[in-house]
Amino acid sequence: MEIILALLLALIPAAAILYPLLRGLGRDEFAGDESSQTAEFARRWEAALDGLRNAELESALGNLDEEDYRWLRRQYMVEAALVLKGMELESAQEREFMEQVEHEVRRVRERALGRSGGPSETSGG
């Protein structure tokens, strides 16, 4: 009985130490790329929304006068609009890039099929 209790007491700290290490092994290291442009837009969007919420709250509590509230609200709205515009541009650039890739793939396929030729080109006659 004492041996089982000793093992349990030893396993609890071991599990607490190993859990974060084992949990991290199954993750894709690139899944949460914090340096991506999308992650930057998400951070800026959340910051703008949090700022708007805080300005609303401070105004409702009477901590901000109307002029300061309108200025803060305008600043956060501009930031949110810039984020949306950036996301829209990023989406358009992504579509343009994919169209270029598809065009290049078609061009390579046509060249490859043209070079391999059909039966008339390989017969030599």
Image (spheres, rainbow, N blue to C red):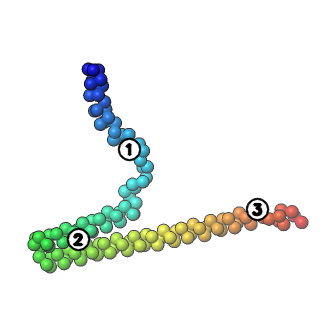
Q: Amino acid at mark 3?
A: Ser
115 relative position to 103: left or right = right
Q: Which residue is mark 2?
A: 52
Going 29% across and 28% down the picture, which residue do you hit?
8
Going 36% across and 72% down the picture, which residue do you hit?
84
Secondary element type, mark 1: helix
Neighbour tally class for label 1: few under 14, some 14-19, many 20 plus, Cα within 10 Å = few
- Within the image, what quadrant is residue 16 found in? top left
Q: Which residue is mark 3?
A: 116
Q: Report how many numbered discs are placed on residues in the image.
A: 3
Neighbour tally class for label 3: few under 14, some 14-19, many 20 plus, Cα within 10 Å = few
Q: CA distance from mark 1 to mark 2?
A: 35 Å
Q: Is residue 27 above or below residue 16?
A: below
Q: Which residue is mark 1?
A: 24
Q: CA distance from mark 1 to mark 3?
A: 49 Å
Lower position in the chain sequence, tag 3 or tag 2: 2
Lower position in the chain sequence, tag 1 or tag 2: 1
